[in-house]
Image (cartoon, rainbow, N blue to C red):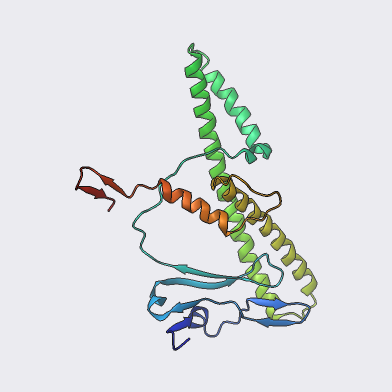
């Protein structure tokens, strides 16, 4: 690492912290075999480096956050209805209520085409509002689970022979299962937004779908406009 001017950023930022990225309950082995190597001249851009509990049975997630300039901020994008919301009872009830209120409010409209457009507009607004609140509550629950897993993981690492260890391990496994469910839903949402044409049934969400979603977004981003043959305008 010294020859290539690389540093273990986790050890650099937390030299005395006892955290492990691998743990085998069967072999009773703990180690930090997963880590990020960062060039020394790039360490100034590293905001955070941590090890978090993950849904994997024996490995934890290593996390690194970078502070880099973003010359092309992300816009609002194109909204597309996710029909998985139809399985949500709260959403269905909200749409039924919105439909009834919209029909009552625009009951005096005689133009059926205009009434249809207003009905779609109100349902779309209700759907976007519901989706944002649902995503916010899901993200809050994910952060809550992650924080609790960190507390439990620290307890397990330092108090493995405690009489309460079985109860702690059960809670740890239950939270990991719930976290996996959240990740699965997010992965399925990424598959939906990536507009992938073929997905095998049972295929696990991977980095491919998230990259495909990002690629589709980049295609829609306009970074430069040509006003005349030799004059162009770029975003600043």
Coordinates of residue 72 in the picture (x, y in percent)? 36, 54
Q: Is 85 situated above or below 20? A: above
Q: Nearer the viewer, residue 97 or 88?
A: 88
Q: Residue furthest front?
A: 229
Q: Is residue 175 left or right of residue 211?
A: right
Based on the displayed image, in which of its 4 quarters is residue 209 positioned? bottom right
Coordinates of residue 116 in the picture (x, y in percent)? 52, 20
**Residue at the spot 58% in from the left edge and 73% down from the top edge:** 51
Exactly how many numbered labels are in the figure? 0
**Residue at the spot 43% in from the left edge and 44% down from the top edge:** 76
Q: Nearer the viewer, residue 175 or 197?
A: 197
Coordinates of residue 208 in the picture (x, y in percent)? 56, 57
Based on the displayed image, in which of its 4 quarters is residue 184 positioned? bottom right
Coordinates of residue 113 in the picture (x, y in percent)? 49, 17
Q: Nearer the viewer, residue 14 or 164?
A: 14
**Residue at the spot 56% in from the left edge and 20% down from the top edge:** 103
Q: Is residue 174 left or right of residue 137?
A: right
**Residue at the spot 60% in from the left edge and 52% down from the top edge:** 186
Q: Residue furthest top?
A: 110
């Amino acid at each position: 690492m010294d020859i290539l001017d690389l540093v273990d950023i986790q050890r650099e930022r937390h030299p005395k912290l006892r955290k492990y990225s691998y743990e085998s309950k069967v072999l009773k082995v703990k180690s930090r075999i997963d880590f990020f190597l960062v060039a020394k001249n790039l360490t100034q851009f590293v905001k955070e480096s941590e090890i978090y509990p993950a849904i994997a049975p024996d490995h934890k997630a290593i996390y690194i956050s970078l502070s880099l300039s973003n010359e092309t901020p992300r816009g609002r994008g194109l909204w597309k209805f996710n029909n998985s919301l139809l399985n949500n009872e709260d959403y269905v009830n909200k749409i039924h209520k919105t439909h009834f209120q919209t029909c009552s409010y625009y009951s005096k409209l005689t133009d059926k085409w205009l009434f249809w457009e207003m009905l779609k507009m109100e349902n779309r607004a209700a759907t976007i509002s519901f989706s944002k609140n649902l995503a916010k509550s899901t993200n809050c629950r994910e952060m809550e689970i992650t924080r609790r897993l960190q507390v439990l993981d620290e307890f397990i690492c330092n108090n493995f022979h405690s009489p309460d260890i079985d109860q702690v391990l059960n809670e740890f496994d239950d939270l990991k299962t719930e976290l996996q469910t959240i990740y699965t839903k997010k992965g399925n949402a990424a598959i939906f937004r990536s507009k992938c044409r073929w997905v095998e049934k049972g295929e696990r969400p991977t980095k491919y779908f998230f990259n495909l979603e990002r690629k589709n977004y980049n295609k829609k981003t306009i970074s430069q406009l040509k006003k005349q043959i030799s004059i162009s305008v770029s975003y600043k």
